[in-house]
Image (cartoon, helix red, strand yellow):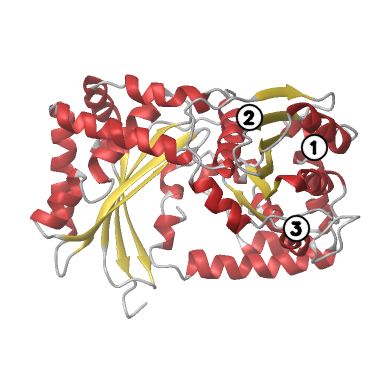
Amino acid sequence: MTQKISLSVIAVLLSFVGFAQQVDYELYTMDNGLDVILHQDNSAPVVTVGVMYHVGAKDEVEGRTGFAHFFEHLLFEGTENIERGEWFDIVSANGGQNNANTTFDRTYYYETFPSNNLELGLWMESERMFHPVINKIGVDTQNEVVKEEKRTRVDNAPYGKIIYSTGINPYLFEKHPYKGSVIGTMADLDAAELDEFLDFFDKFYGPNNATLVIAGDIDLEETKVLANKYFSEIPKGPEVERVKIEEDPIEETIVATEYDDNIQIPAKIFVYRTPGMGERDTYVLDMISSILTDGKSSRMYKRLVDDEKIALQVLALNRTQEDYGTYVMGGLAMGDTDLSEIAASVDDEIEKLKAELISEREYEKLQNKFENRYVSSNSSIQGIASSLATYHVLFDDVDLINKEIEIYRSITREEIKEVANKYLNASSRLDLDYLPTPNDQ
């Protein structure tokens, strides 16, 4: 009888496994265009099988937003060989866990199993790619699920327009699909016909637009045989055309006000449009965001919250995406503090960063923080699998999993000052007052 090992036990085992800085992997491509990444780590009996499709909200057409995120839900409905509603039961009955997530740029599905269920994970993901059942009952069911998610996580969430960018991106992007939101609009989903969902799947869910990642307690040669068994016969899909859409520079301050029914504390928000993934300036901006707004030791927290006591909390959301990123910073007003006071203090801290090199001590602390972040992101098999797929699909460089920390290590204090002057300018940002909805509205 085959023994099943629960993931709770495996998690305990993994907590005692040290992380080797070098992540070894093998990358190859099947004849149908499916890229496959293998990572062997036999330190614990666990394996993650994931598939990342290079399709996200930016690939949708006007009037049909939300399709990419909708498919994240729809493709758990069932397949020709997995009955509707049985997907999660199969995973849990075999000691596993699974999930999926969608961004503007990609959609990722994965299962983590005890390693003796590797073949099960491969079969399930091949079923999702080759034999999904996309019908009216599934579309109608998931339509209601997505509506509830939108109500809970976006519409009724405090500061939801900031967290999910629906109150930010329309100001920063005029041409690019980033001006929308990942979850889309319910009106677009309601208006879509079944044939449109089928067409979306056919266009984007072919093996040549996907990367299969298998990480954990595997034998490389045996795993290649199994991957070939379940995926090699899936027909190649149409080539996905990528259209690069460039935004015009922001040359004067965008001043705006947004209201939120779910808050009582106003916030001052500054948002900057930043470069896309892989550009060196993006890495420098990661460090800048850490200096200014990352945690209680950051400059803005110490000044606005601890010293001046004009803010209850500082906000920081550094979103890096394939084509462009956004850096959101700001503060929640303390008591009757005028938002202009928060703006003045934030601007003063920005100007200090632009005028003076950070200290050697602050620089050393910053490097340690990024070293720890790097180790943490690759300290589990799930994390490694996700990183390998992401670096391949969005950066076209799997080896960044090993090289990226060297990029951060190479960033100088002078470079931090230079990039702050390049991007953190009042004339090229959104200046947003985020307010409770007045009682008369």
Image spot of residue 351 (x, y percent): 15, 35
Quadrant including the N terminus: bottom right
Taking the image as shown, residue 403 lies to the left or right of residue 87, namely: left
Residue type at numbered disc 2: Val
Query: Residue at point 42% right, 56% down?
Result: 163
| Mark 2 or 3, nearer chain start | 3
Q: CA distance from mark 1 to mark 3?
A: 28 Å
Disc 3 target residue: 94
Image spot of residue 352 (x, y percent): 13, 34
Asked if residue 241 can be seen in this view, the reply is no
Q: CA distance from mark 1 to mark 2?
A: 19 Å
Q: Nearer the viewer, mark 2 or mark 3?
A: 3
Taking the image as shown, residue 331 lies to the left or right of residue 238, namely: left
- Residue 206's label in the rendered image is 1
| Mark 1 or 3, nearer chain start | 3
Query: Residue at point 87% right, 63% down?
Result: 83
Residue type at numbered disc 1: Gly
Disc 2 target residue: 243
Query: Residue at point 39% right, 30% down?
Result: 282
State if disc 3 and disc 1 touch (CB < 8 Å).
Answer: no
Q: Is residue 267 above or below residue 170?
A: below
Quadrant including the C terminus: bottom left
